[in-house]
Image (spheres, rainbow, N blue to C red):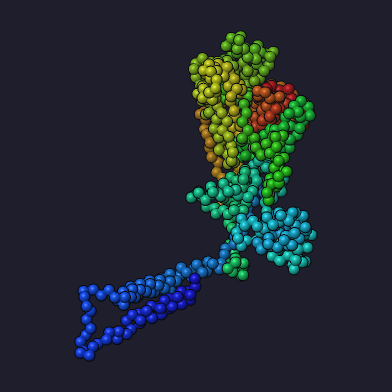
Amino acid sequence: MSLTAVILIIVAVIAAVLVVLFLLFGRGEGRFTFDIGGAAPRAEGGTDTSSDTGFKERLTGLGVFAVGVIGVLTARLWSMQLVSSDDYTKQAETNRTRTVTTSAPRGRILDRNGVELVTNRSSLTVTADSEVADNPFECQLLANIIGMPAAAVRRNIQNASEGAQSTRVVASDVSRRVVAFIEERPYLFDGVTVEERAVRFYPQGSLAAHVLGYVGTITSEQLESEAGDSESSMDYQSGDTVGQAGIEYQYETVLQGVRGEQNVYVDADGNVLDYGSGVDPQAGSDLQLTIDSKIQKAAEESLSSTIQKLQETSNKDCKCGSVVCLDVTSGDVIAMASMPTYSPNTFVGGISASDWEEISGEDSQNPLLNRAISGQYPSASTIKPLTTMAALDAGIATAQSSYVCTGYWTGFGKAYGQYCWNHSGHGTMNLQSGITFSCDVVFYEIGKAFFEAGSEGMQETFRTWGLGSKEGVDLPSELAGRVPDKDWKWNYFTWADDDARSWQGGDNTNLAIGQGDLLVTPLQMACAYAGIANNGTVYKPHLLKSVLSQSGTGSIIKHKKEKLREVDEKQEYLDLVKAGLHGVIYEESESQASHFTNMSVEVAGKTGTAEIANAPAANGWFVAYAPADDPKYVVASCIEGGGYGSTSAMYVVRDVLGALYDEPDTSSEVSQGDR
């Protein structure tokens, strides 16, 4: 109700009350008559119950009520005019103004050499005012020229996720022909405009997709989470584009810019009448990663080609794999690849139903999974250097310990015999040669010794080197793997009988060779071998190199290397393990050695072949660091269903090292290395 109307009502009420008061009191004593004798009239009896007297009392009450109403209205009028006038002025201003927000471009993502991995591109976007949804002719015309159903056009225009007064996106990435048609016929497209908007763009296609991640429209769950996070500095709205995976998600608060604001004046129906002051959107900050796009490309191409060759030759079910390369002196992730992969561009603007079905179908092999950090596998023989150090630390074995391998081990009796991978036997072995030739019998003996001592020294050593816990890389969805022990087995196999749930000697021998219930990720094994190369020092793996300044050149934040762990190990034990790993490359197999003797630096590494129950083929492992005498890089690869590590993952590691040193593999020898 307006102020004028309130005043008129007050005046009318006052006038009515004055009339009543005049009728009641205005005639004074004139209502009484006097007799001839001049005596004043006097009522007879003690109480006047005449109708005239009752009417008088009712009028008096009405007068009191009216005076009270006038007082209340007067006080309210005074409050409105003097006390609350500023509040009502603000409310009136709010009723005629609105704030329309505009999204800001996200920051770019660059590799360590400044190559753009993620940027933004201009998209020709058809937008419309909300009233266009009420014009079926205009909606149908838009649908015809854009090439989409009229119902979809109307639904997009009715979408108010970006605000009631914001223009609605009808279609993005429209052709120049559509733009020309609309702009040449403004009389047909009232309320329709064409804008250039910034959308996410991945110029390298699928390169480093699992590292970079992708973006999408913020979900209701994410909105609720942000609203409930008192420490969050972001102010999201429905319809905002946010990171959903990888670096896009991990550094969302850095990449996400500050929304722009535009004040508009509206009428009572919400129609925009004029524009006021505004603030331009501020783009997010650019990130520079530790990834080297050249090495990343080599890693992905090698993974893809190796898997394809395996499919064509021996392992048709081989479809997945991963590889990670670290700088052992800093923890920089130089490359991280996972197969199968996908293109983040597929998610820009919303993924189609057909694309989503292709990515999430049963035969897709989960291309969104980053197997380098989320793939959990038995480590196979790559664990043997850690088993060796566990035995040395616990006094289970010494550098002079000797073992005889006949190809079949019966340490727990013939009923519980176990084969070495080399059924012909290795003969006499020690710890160093046990690593070089990957003799299972050596490590069966170590597992048996720990079991008979009632010790969980192997598990303790594995955990000391980082297994069973996350490495803390700056990516979402990293998994911790598993180091099994007697408590875990008892609590895990709750449906089994007590004997089956108890820790057995076979559990220890399997653990010693990286089989059984042990689970590791490729990143964990890369970090463990980086620690061996660094004499016990492991730097935290990371992908962020710096946050670049928005004005000029330089960085506002630079990553500082951080020690993840410092394993206190005797140097003589480390030297023994390193000698064994060097022997794997150059002594175990001439065919395998031929792929490394053509390099200018020497390499140390280990193969692994993890047998999986009910799987058509084993998982192939290979982990190596170089140069062997002054380590700089470590590379770890696992190929699911690849078979022997020496005939699968070894080729991927060699190709990555070749890219690092610009020395491609020139050997045509088919590797015949160990398991």
Q: Quadrant of residue 194?
A: bottom right
User: Which quarter of the figure has residue 272?
Assistant: bottom right
Direction from residue 288 to residue 598 in the image, left or right: right
Q: Where is residue 181 in the image (x, y as percent from the top left)?
A: 78, 63
Residue pictured at 68% horizontal, 16% vertical: 422
Q: Residue at x 40, y 72 (%)?
A: 73
Residue sitting nearer the eye, 180 or 344: 180
Name of the residue lying farthest toward the top: 414
Compared to residue 198, the image places residue 564 above or below, namely above
Q: Is residue 425 above or below residue 268?
A: above
Q: Which of 22 and 166 is in front in this view?
A: 22
Q: Which of the two residues, 607 or 180, is positioned nearer the viewer here?
A: 180
Q: Which residue is drawn at 53% across and 28% down?
A: 463
Residue that protrudes farthest toward the bottom in the picture: 36
Q: Give how far across and how far down residue 405 sits, in percent.
A: 64, 13
Q: Is residue 626 visible?
A: no
Residue 546 point in image, percent of width and height: 59, 48
Q: Can residue 8 be seen in this view?
A: yes
Q: As drawn, is 362 to the left or to the right of 73?
A: right
* 235 left or right of 217 in image: left
Residue 126, x across and y down, in percent: 71, 59
Q: Which residue is drawn at 56% across and 52% down?
A: 556
Which part of the image, by quadrant, shows the C terminus? top right
Number of numbered tags placed on the structure image: 0
Q: Against 253, is 338 above or below?
A: above
